[in-house]
Image (cartoon, rainbow, N blue to C red):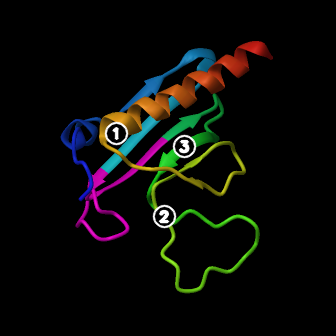
Amino acid sequence: MQNVQGIETLLELTGQVVQQEHGYWVEIRVRRVEAIPVVPHGIRYALTLHEPGGKRVMGYDNVHAAKPSGGFKYAGQVLPYDHKHRHISDQGAPCEFKDAYQLLQDFFADVDRILKEVDKT
């Protein structure tokens, strides 16, 4: 069974837009759904970082399955839903959902990493 620690806190954050440095911003969208094997924690979420013009540059979500890399077909395989898009064109890389607090911590660590890269340019 998945750890549901922090789910209520995450649900309370839905709809929040958090301004970041350099005009970047974070949007948090979360909703409760029926727990099923590919969404055992019972929430759909999208945590996204956007550049000043609004384009998403990074995100964590479980709205769709992560696409397998390498161009191989995975007929009959259940693809992971919890994943992150590491940059604008990334189709998604699986990530483990431990609990909502860890999800937020990992997401904002990536936000900080990206904003530090922006500082260097």
Q: In front here: 16 or 39?
A: 39
Locate residue 35, reporting x and y percent: 24, 65
- Residue 111 colored in magenta in the image: no
Q: Is residue 12 left or right of residue 82?
A: left
Q: Which of pointers 1 and 2 lies earlier in the amino acid sequence?
A: 1
Q: Which mark is residue 115?
A: none
Give the number of the mark in front: 1 or 3: 3
Amino acid type, callout 2: Pro
CB contact under 8 Å: marks 2 and 3: no
From this viewpoint, which residue is outermost toward the bottom? 76
* Residue position for label 2: 80
Which quadrant is home to the N terminus? bottom left
* Residue position for label 3: 59
From this viewpoint, which residue is outermost toward the right? 121
The stretch in magenta equals 31-47
Q: Which of pointers 2 and 3 lies earlier in the amino acid sequence?
A: 3
Amino acid type, callout 3: Gly
Locate residue 93, reporting x and y percent: 60, 53
Q: In this view, does 95 lie to the left or right of 115?
A: left
Q: Which mark is residue 15?
A: 1
Residue 14 seen in the figure: no
Give the number of the mark in front: 1 or 2: 2
CB contact under 8 Å: marks 1 and 2: no
Residue depicted at 44% across the width and 50% down the height: 96
Amino acid type, callout 1: Gly
Tell me the element at label 3: strand
Using a 10 Å C-alpha cutoff, classify the residue at mark 2 as few (fewer than 14 neighbours), some (14 to 19) or many (20 or more). many
Q: Which of pointers 1 and 3 lies earlier in the amino acid sequence?
A: 1
Residue 99 seen in the figure: yes
